[in-house]
Amino acid sequence: MTSTDSKNPVGRLKSRPQFLAVRHGEARKGRIFLLEVLDRKDDAPPRVGFTVTKKHGNAVERNRMRRRLKEAVRLNAAFAMQPGHDYVIVARREVLGIPFDQLSRQLIHRIENRPSNKSRSDKTAPRKE
């Protein structure tokens, strides 16, 4: 089985360099999660990665946040992802408390709506790693 199949046309980001590359793209902020988007400038299927930092709970809670986000992408948001783009969803603790349908709507909204700022390179302060 490859990273994309007929059921889910979205591939997965798996390596650290892939995640770091997406950090140089757009940042679409929300109260539930941060969506980072990078245009790879090709026609390959979109890819998605999920990040939950340790400050947002223990391993059980972080895994539950990641599972909820994966399922929201699989069921609802994958169709909105554009070919040739990489997406990283950085969860916030609110992912656990929000109803699933609202989480899905927020995810679709962030994917479809582009912010006014084009990229992070316009900002003066670099992000900590």
Image: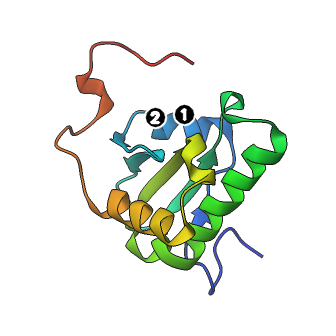
Quick one: 43 or 33, which is closer to the camera? 33
Q: Position of residue 6 (x, y in %)?
A: 62, 87
Q: Are marks 1 and 2 in contact (CB under 8 Å)?
A: yes
- Colour style of the rendered protein structure: rainbow
User: Would you identify the image quadrant in which residue 105 lies?
Assistant: bottom left
- Specify the farthest residue to the left: 116
Q: Quadrant of the N terminus?
A: bottom right
Q: Which mark is residue 23?
A: 2
In the displayed structure image, the side of residue 101 where residue 113 appears, left or right: left
Q: Helix, strand or loop at disc 2? A: loop
Whether 32 is drawn above or below 17: the answer is below
Give the residue type at disc 2: Arg
- Specify the farthest residue to the top: 125
In the displayed structure image, the side of residue 1 where residue 75 appears, left or right: left
Residue at 60% x, 59% y: name it. 69
Q: Position of residue 45 (x, y in %)?
A: 49, 69
Residue at 40% x, 51% y: name it. 40
In the displayed structure image, the side of residue 51 where residue 22 appears, left or right: left
Report how far apart the C-alphas of labels 1 and 2 lie in the structure: 5 Å
Total number of numbered labels? 2
Residue at label 1? 20
Q: Position of residue 117 (x, y in %)?
A: 20, 37
Q: Helix, strand or loop at disc 1? A: helix
Residue at 27% x, 13% y: name it. 124
Residue at 60% x, 65% y: name it. 11
- Specify the farthest residue to the bottom: 6
Give the residue type at disc 1: Leu
- Label 2 packing within 10 angstroms: few (<14), some (14-19), many (20+): some
Whether 119 is drawn above or below 104: the answer is above
Q: Which mark is residue 67?
A: none
Q: Position of residue 106 (x, y in %)?
A: 40, 61
